[in-house]
Image: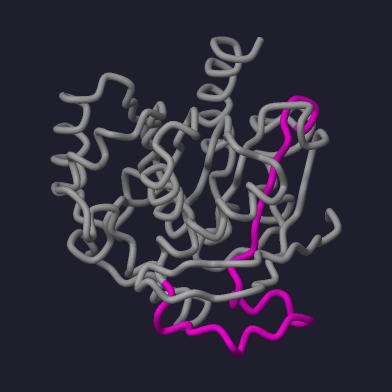
């Protein structure tokens, strides 16, 4: 496991216009040094942390889809995910913080690390929702958006309640909505310049598939760089341990093609 690193974010503006000062953020850095390779950000699923080598075992590593000899990989902890016991987050107004706020914090952390653009953002369930929010905040800074078994809006399309690590993490999941206080969802999604690679699970019962398909079909009609990939099943998107070979094959195909087209 890579050493947990810590950085202080001087100002964290929240969606309700309040400000949190001097937030400690923890993260892990894998692969090549920052500034020497394309950067991939891997976002949380509902119960994970920045230990990518555990949660994404089989997808990340030497000669894997996310090849640590080719990429710089960053994974950031959501403050309050109960993983980092050494930092006291009791002062944070958890009842106010949304998934969009977390997306802002992730960008601020990347900027402090002098990372201004991302080759890819990959995330499952909650992590995929945060990835959507990040892409809406900076539509031109992410080359490839890769949400897995997730949605750009949660509550309207939710069918089955997922299991969250704690009430705060669940509240973040429920707050995912890229259209909130913005344009209609298709209009805001159309502004994203990223190549959008939608990975969905055939047997996933979390979301209303009809609504998701309708959204993705309409998005594909107005935005040419949207692609779809289907997985047979993932037993547990929280850990991504079951059927991980499927995830590896799909992600490997996406990254290899985009790497050749944009980096090599």
**View extreme (bottom): residue:** 90
- Compared with residue 153, is residue 58 higher up or lower down, i.e. above or below? above
Q: Give the image location of residue 4, x and y in percent.
A: 81, 62
103 sits to left or right of 232: right
Residue at position x 55%, y 83% in the image: 92
Closer to the camera in the image, 47 or 264: 264
Q: Give the image location of residue 106, x and y in percent.
A: 57, 55
In the rendered image, the quadrant that contains the C terminus is: top right
Closer to the camera in the image, 188 or 163: 188
Q: In the image, which residues are magenta?
A: 68-97
109 sits to left or right of 123: right
Q: Give the image location of residue 218, x and y in percent.
A: 14, 33
Inspect the magenta stretch and tell me whether residue 92 lies in it.
Answer: yes
Q: Which quadrant holds residue 76?
A: bottom right
193 sits to left or right of 60: left
In the rendered image, the quadrant that contains the N terminus is: bottom right
Magenta portion: prevailing SS class? loop
């Amino acid at each position: 496991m890579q050493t947990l690193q810590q950085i202080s974010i001087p100002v964290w503006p929240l969606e309700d216009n309040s400000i949190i000062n001097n937030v400690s953020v923890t993260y892990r850095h894998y692969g090549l040094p920052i500034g020497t390779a394309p950067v991939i950000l891997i976002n949380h699923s509902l119960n994970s942390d920045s230990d990518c080598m555990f949660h994404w075992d089989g997808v990340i590593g030497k000669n894997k889809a996310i090849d640590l000899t080719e990429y710089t990989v960053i994974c950031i902890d959501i403050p309050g995910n109960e993983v980092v016991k050494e930092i006291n987050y009791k002062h944070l107004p958890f009842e106010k913080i949304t998934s969009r706020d977390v997306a802002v914090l992730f960008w601020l952390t990347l900027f402090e690390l002098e990372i201004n653009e991302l080759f890819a953002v990959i995330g499952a369930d909650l992590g995929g929702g945060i990835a959507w929010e990040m892409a809406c905040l900076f539509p031109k800074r992410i080359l490839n958006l890769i949400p897995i078994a997730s949605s750009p809006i949660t509550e309207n399309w939710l069918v089955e309640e997922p299991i969250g690590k704690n009430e705060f993490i669940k509240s973040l999941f429920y707050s995912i909505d890229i259209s909130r206080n913005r344009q209609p969802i298709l209009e805001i999604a159309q502004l994203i310049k990223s190549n959008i690679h939608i990975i969905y699970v055939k047997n996933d019962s979390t979301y209303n598939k009809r609504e998701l398909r309708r959204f993705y079909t309409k998005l594909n009609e107005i935005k040419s760089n949207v692609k779809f990939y289907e997985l047979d099943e993932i037993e547990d998107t929280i850990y991504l341990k079951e059927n991980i070979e499927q995830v590896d094959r799909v992600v490997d195909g996406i990254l290899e093609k985009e790497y050749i087209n944009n980096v090599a």
